[in-house]
Amino acid sequence: MDIYELIRKRKSVRAFTDEPVTDEKIRRILETARLAPSANNKQEWRFITVRDPEMRSKLAEAARGQTFVGEAPVVLVCCAQTDNHVMTCFQSCYPIDLAIAIDHITLCAVEEGLGTCWIGAFFENQVKELLGIPAHIRVVALLPVGVPQDPAETEKKRLDYDIIVKTETWS
């Protein structure tokens, strides 16, 4: 599949089959995150793979009761080991760098026949407590991963190109 097709096919998956996800597939998609660019090449991303059903269920509770999080065969806990570096534009590096790495994961998951759903609705302190994550580490996202129950493409409702793209100046 080419990158344009992967982007078109990627969708948020909230229902997964019981089919297990191999260690090889998880390693391949996480390798793409490792290769992602980062500000000052800091590579602040860190990932915890969670397969244990009981822990996945607890993570779903920490994700505001979104039960599908725990129903995925794997949950990736996407973290940042950060020095809180701020770029010249006054943006923190770690959320942007993690977003790039997570996007690599979500696109490559499609290539592997997997689905994902980017979860930002969770209580960081609960996730840290559940997984023994040190206080100085930030939990940026949870990413359930599995084979989608419905592999069909979905229509993406997006703003028109001319609304989001300006030429030369804002006006």
Image: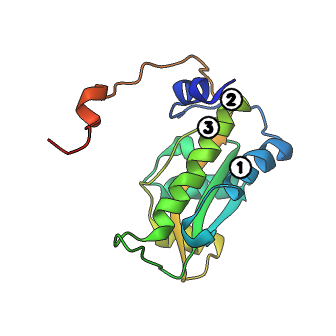
Image x and y of residue 135, in percent: 54, 83
Q: Residue 32 carries which label?
A: 1
Report the residue that reaches farthest toward the left. 171
Quadrant of the rendered image containing residue 24: top right
Can residue 70 be seen here? The reply is: no
Name the residue: 68% across, 29% down. Answer: 17
SS of the residue under disc 3: helix
Name the residue: 34% across, 24% down. Answer: 157
Image x and y of residue 127, in percent: 55, 67
Q: Which mark is residue 107?
A: 3
Label 3 sits on what residue type? Answer: Leu
Front in this rendered view, residue 62 or 48: 48
SS of the residue under disc 2: loop
Other residues around mark 1 within 10 Å, as few (<14) / some (14–19) / many (≥20) = some
Residue beneath disc 2: 17
Quadrant of the rendered image containing residue 121: bottom left
Asked whether disc 3 touches disc 1, contact meaning CB atoms under 8 Å apart, the reply is: yes
Name the residue: 51% across, 54% down. Answer: 99
Where is the C terminus found, in terms of image quarters?
Answer: top left
Mark nearer the viewer, 3 or 2: 3
Q: Which of the marked residues, 2 or 1, is nearer the chain's N terminus?
A: 2
Where is the N terminus found, in terms of image quarters?
Answer: top right
Front in this rendered view, residue 26 or 63: 26
Question: What's the distance in space between the residues labelled 3 and 2, CA to CA?
Answer: 19 Å
